[in-house]
Amino acid sequence: MIFKDIDLFDISNQATINIIENNIYLDLSNIKANGHRLNIDNRLVECVRLSSDTITSLNEWMEIINKLEISFDNIEWIEISNKNFILDKSNRIEINLNEKYKIKFIKLNINNKYSNFIDKIKIEILNRKFPGLIVEARSDGFGARFMTILNAMYLSSKLGYKFGIVWPKSSHDQKSLKNLDNNELAGVYEGDEEFIFDKEFLNSYSYLGKISVANILRGETHDINDYLKTPHSENFGYYVSYDITGLQGLDKDYLKEYPKLWKQIKFAKPVNDIIDDINKKTQKYFPNKFIAIHIRAGDAVYDYIRSGLDAYWRKMMPNEIAMALIDENLKINNDIVLLGDDFTQLRELKKFYNNKIYLIEDFIDDTIVGIKRVIFDIVFLSKAKEIYSGASSFAKTASYIGLGKRPTYYFEYFTEDKMIDIIKNYFNKDLNLHPYQKSYSLLFLHNLCLRKNISRDELITILNEGRSYDKDNCAFIIHIFSHYIYLKEYDKADNVLGILFDMPDFDWLYKFMIHRKDSIHIYKTFVAHTLKYSKIKYQNISYMAAKISIDTKLPKNRIFQYIQNYLLGLKINHRSKYLLNYYIDIAEKLNISINQINSQVEITAKNDSYLKSELENKKIDLKNQIDINRSNEILLQNIKSENQKLQKLNADLSLAYNAAKSNAKNYLSYKLGQALIKASKNWYKGGYIKFIFEAIKITKEHKKRCK
């Protein structure tokens, strides 16, 4: 059972219990109303729990219990599946009903062989003390997890629910990127729940192992009162997102409650020690408070997900924006503390500003590393009088628990025109930054300029400069491709797209793009352009169109066409296998087979017995090749993918066969027949594809002569 004993109360002592033969009847109809706000009459039961001192296994319980039935009117009964029977750690059998039924009567049928056990079975009828749980259950970053905990605490307090947390261990602690080209990065740490929270808090609110992880990325946009409707979205209640700003009916100033909620969380001693240390240091060094600038970079600038920067581009803060904020606050003599996940960048900035600014590490002991460092940073950040940041969960959490409001987002603080000027004026200062930082700044600049009246050629120039700092960033290629399409330079678009397929992060980007093609504009545009401009002469566009059409499950005729555009260009390479297999499968389903080509051969040879004999032999040989060599994908593709082209020649073939035999060599039928024989001899070199083009050429020449 998901719920803890402290979440439930037992109403069995108020029930009327009757034992008739091997049945135990429980009448709940007269129980007084004492349930939660959505179950005032106690008719929604969470669980029936059975226990006995002598029964210790699930098999024993299943042997003793024939069935459990429930009823509302004592006339119609519903049998509860034994899939709902679970043995708990105390060897009690739980029959979970999850408040799905209105119940007044319960009947427990005991196997006749065990009728003497009836009086040894203790029955509990358990009801919830509250409508359900509102649960944080993320597995990503520390900030996103804590934002969701605070949201769960707030909503549960407003709606009469209980909040719960699921804080799983994460491989990020060991595997996240912490160093690149001697550039020191913070990495991602979540830690264990036992290290962060005290035991009492976990005993009350942790549902780790009971409720699964659910990384809900969408924000909540429904009405807040929807939480009070049944049935709930989950058996236990609801998962909650880290973003509830879109909830309808939410109090305007709800974030003002978050500093109080933060103080209600009971932390383990190591965390309390960190909080106490920060309180002392901030009071000592910053009695008049300080300005904090949180420069988010980390995985989104350095790791593979940088290829999807268009989805995250305002989450990170470009170095140039940070410098503009530093200069602005130095002019008014504000104390400035820099925080971020690129430690090398922060040290470079302090050096550049001749130690006029502080870094968070100036106040950290050597023992504060890993998850301790994460906690130190977020709590220290919360002590600022103003927090400048991108749309990072880390900075949001700090601002929520310290200031009771959102941080100051730099992209709202500065206008877009101002940010364009800042990037251009501050770019490439005398800072020893990693090239990826410069790459990100230029992609950010491009995305700003894209919203302005700036020529496509200039945008391509910005992208090419950005790509010079990061050759493996797929985002640049996606944008350059789109700009060439808008410029109607389709050959250039096709050529630049060819670079994408061999980039190390292409597979990740492709999956990410397909998943978000309807929610992110650049991906939606890219897919539309790829499908629109799939032509035989644009091989790379055609390949991408074929791949997208398969993975987005477009109609088969469209898939067929995109694949054919690629294969007809004679682009037989390592990518063909994937498309050939799929194409052959479609062809078979559409009944495109060798028999259709055979019918063409029959018509071609019907007036020439010698030619017919030769073609029959070749046809038999060809059929044998297909039967024996089914795995030869190129052969099958050559036959099947060109079938439609062959059918278009039918009319010309029929005319030619009526011509005089004496002049056969001058007639279309003879020339086509000879070309087909030649093709069959060279099938392994793509003879059948070449035959199509040869047949079209012969037919055109014939028509000219007939005029």
Image: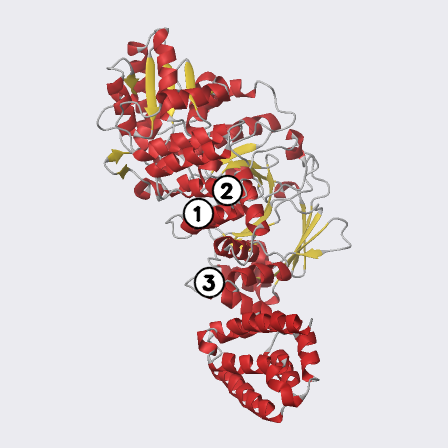
Please give the residue where the numbered disc 2 appears in the rendered image: 484
Q: Amino acid under label 1? A: Val
> In percent of the image, x 59 and y 50: which residue is there?
532
| Residue 216 seen anywhere in this rendered image of the structure | no
Q: Position of residue 508 (x, y in %)?
A: 43, 48
Q: Is residue 561 above or below residue 466?
A: below
The percent position of residue 609, horizontal first and vertical second, equals 62, 93
Marks 1 and 2 sit apart, C-alpha to C-alpha, by 9 Å
- Res 496 label: 1
**Residue identified by numbered label 3:** 571
Q: Residues within 10 Å of mark 1 (few under 14, many from 20)?
A: some
Please, what is the three-letter code of the amino acid marked with disc 3? Lys
Q: Label 2 amino acid?
A: Tyr
The residue tagged with tag 1: helix, strand or loop? helix
**Real-space Cα separation, disc 1 to disc 3, in angstroms:** 17 Å
The crowding category of the residue bearing disc 3, from other C-alpha atoms within 10 Å (few below 14, some 14 to 19, many at least 20), is some
Instruction: Tell me the residue at 65%/27% (across/down).
Output: 248
